[in-house]
Amino acid sequence: METFAGTEFQLLKGGDGPALLYLHGGNGGGVWYPVLETLAKSHTVYAPEHPGFGLGEKPEWLDHIDDLAYFYLELLAHWNIDEVRIVASSIGGWIALEMALRDQSLIHSLTLLSPAGVKTPGVARPNSFLWSDRVYIAKLFHDQTIVDRLLAQKLSDEDMERKARNRIATARLGRNSRMHSPTLQKWLSRIQVPTLIVSGAEDKVQPPAYCETLNDGLPDSRLHTIPDCGHLPATEQPQDFLDAYLRFQNDILP
């Protein structure tokens, strides 16, 4: 466990090379995913669990998504990181965008996987907060063999509690706003950081049109859509994601 500014949180770290901050989605952190192991071959990967998620207590200061943005900006400064690549999924992508809106001086690039934060007029986002856990898992992936495998797993009481608290934390931060910020959407043009947006063509949690809207609003972005893929590209189609990330990083080399 790590403690910063009086807040205790879990941090996974590994690898060697340029700093990479991984911001997890609503499913939670605390897991060294295979894709992180691959990224750690060429980066020093920092994968914190968001304060208020998992089994940690909700900090008194945590009320809105921008609170996490400020927390991570201050944490990067505390770690003396002067340049960071951010890879972020879903609500983590929203946090990353809010960070860049406030201070992009340390951010080398953004890679956003099915990010929340903006919406497309006339295209409704399903209210995933009303789904049961089984329905939510089924909607996350296009490949239903992954769903069958996950539903067949027997979870410990601790794992079940962690899952429930992650959903509560996500709802606390995003339910009332339907997972977007009008202010962020209005000021996207201020984010000058090179950005890769990765979208699953079969995303049933967030319409792929939302990624298209984000791509249209950012000055320096590109959109990579993965076929036969749902809301979690780095899990369902990891090689496609990694290939796109590598091309992106090579393209933006100075």
Image (cartoon, rainbow, N blue to C red):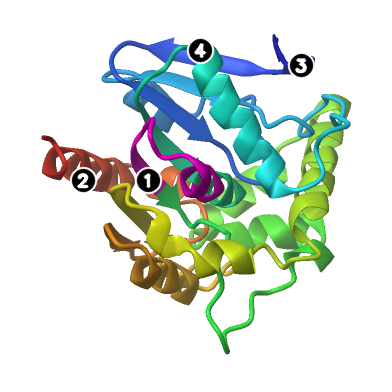
Q: Is residue 19 above or below residue 137?
A: above
Query: Are dots 1 and 4 in contact, CB under 8 Å?
Result: no
Q: Amino acid at mark 4?
A: Trp
Dot 3: within a 10 Å radius of its alpha carbon, few (fewer than 14), some, or many (20 or more) residues?
A: some
Residue holding disc 2: 248
**At numbered mark 2, what does the secondary structure look like: helix, strand or loop?**
helix
Q: Which residue does the image show at 58% across and 24% down from the upper left?
A: 74
Q: Which mark is residue 111?
A: 1
- The span shown in magenta is 97-111
Q: Which residue does the image show at 54% across and 36% down from the upper left?
A: 23
Q: Earlier in the sequence, mark 3 or mark 1?
A: 3
Q: Is residue 44 above or below residue 134?
A: above
**At numbered mark 3, what does the secondary structure look like: helix, strand or loop?**
strand
Q: Amino acid at mark 3?
A: Glu
Q: Is residue 15 magenta?
A: no
Residue holding disc 4: 79
**At numbered mark 1, what does the secondary structure look like: helix, strand or loop?**
strand
